Image (tube, helix red, strand yellow):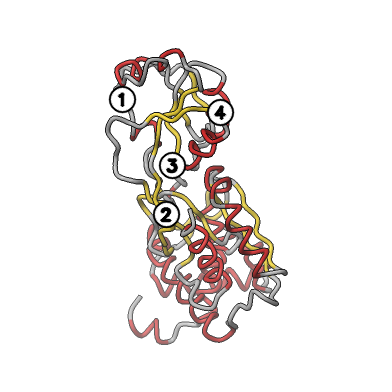
Amino acid sequence: MNPMNFRTADLNLFRVFVTLLEEKNATRAGERLGLSQSAVSHALRRLREMVRDDLFVRGQTGLRPTPRALEIADAARTALKLLETAVTAQRFDPSVDHHAFHIAAGSYISYVLGPLIAERVLALAPNVQVHFRNLYAGMTEDLDTGALDMVIGCFEAIPGRFSYRQLFEETGVWVARVGHPAFVDGVSYEVLAGLPHLAVTGGNDDPDRTSAGHLGLRRVTSWGERYALGEDSPRPFSVQDSFSALNMVGRSDMVCVLPRRLAQLAAERGKVMMIEPPVAPSPTPFGAVLRATDGPGSPNDWLLSVCQAAAATL
């Protein structure tokens, strides 16, 4: 847009723009904003004139943003959120404030880090709830809208509208059942490579890897791929999560690569034995992804501090 158009722009037009991005429907956008459908259409028409682009086109699932709309989406969201925070935000007080947090994380994070987070929340915030859910395909969209507060995982690509804070690092280790006949006389990596390997895929709809489109978080490759002993190793089975893998390895002659902390807990209970990899890749960082606009004093900033304190004790 040219400078003259920007100086005369109505801030409410960008509220309509961001809401249309999220709802993909003019009627629903109007309901959220308390506007009629005709008012939303009028605002969109003014925006199109300012930006000199259609911004949205109709698709099978509703309004689809044009490439130009996607270019300005992050800046519009961030600017509106910063303005809202500046005029309305009050510092979150966990000792008295009521709040419900929603975190997307894999089963490994929930199992290893979840109890440490719960311990701190229960001690510090009597009116706070924390709800964990699995990673899913639409989680970045829900981060945008506030339906989700945080995603915890290992990512190699993060959209610029989010912030990332590393929590801890993890390495992988091979596991086999206790008493496995192949290791009675010690560990041979040649034997290990020839055993049937169990793969952990993350399920059919693999949200551990990608979230579709321009909104996506891209995760690092799987543990099995990073610690592979060779392309010829037999892989007769795959399962969707590490806990299913532990159960299957513990009751078969298959072997598997799992995160070390999870394997250690299982080994301490006598369920599996751990086998150090012959060559270890660099540790995998696990971190928290939040909206970049979640500034100091916000509820999500407090949640991040709790996660960081919990991770420091791992």
Cα separation between marks 1 and 2: 26 Å
Cα separation between marks 2 and 4: 25 Å
In which quadrant of the rendered view does residue 174 lie? top left
Is 63 drawn above or below residue 223 in the view shown?
Answer: below
Q: Amino acid at mark 1?
A: Leu
Image-based side of 197 in relation to 111, left or right: left
Is 153 drawn above or below residue 101 in the view shown?
Answer: above
The spot of residue 231 in percent (x, y) is 30, 21
Residue at the disc numbered 2 = 168
Q: Nearer the viewer, residue 4 or 300?
A: 300
Other-residue count near label 4 (Cα within 10 Å), few / some / many at <14 / 14–19 / ≥20: some
Q: Secondary structure at mark 2?
A: strand
Can you tell which mark lies on residue 80? none
Q: Amino acid at mark 2?
A: Phe
Q: Earlier in the sequence, mark 3 or mark 4?
A: 3
Cα separation between marks 3 and 2: 19 Å
Q: Amino acid at mark 4?
A: Lys
Does residue 138 appear anywhere in the picture? no
Can you tell which mark lies on residue 271? 4
Can you tell which mark lies on residue 209? 3
Residue at the disc numbered 1 = 229
The spot of residue 100 in percent (x, y) is 67, 64
Cα separation between marks 3 and 4: 29 Å
User: Which residue sits furthest top?
Assistant: 181
Look at 54% across and 80% down and name the residue there.
85
Look at 51% across and 22% down and name the residue there.
178
Q: Earlier in the sequence, mark 2 or mark 4?
A: 2
Q: Secondary structure at mark 3?
A: loop
Q: Secondary structure at mark 4?
A: loop
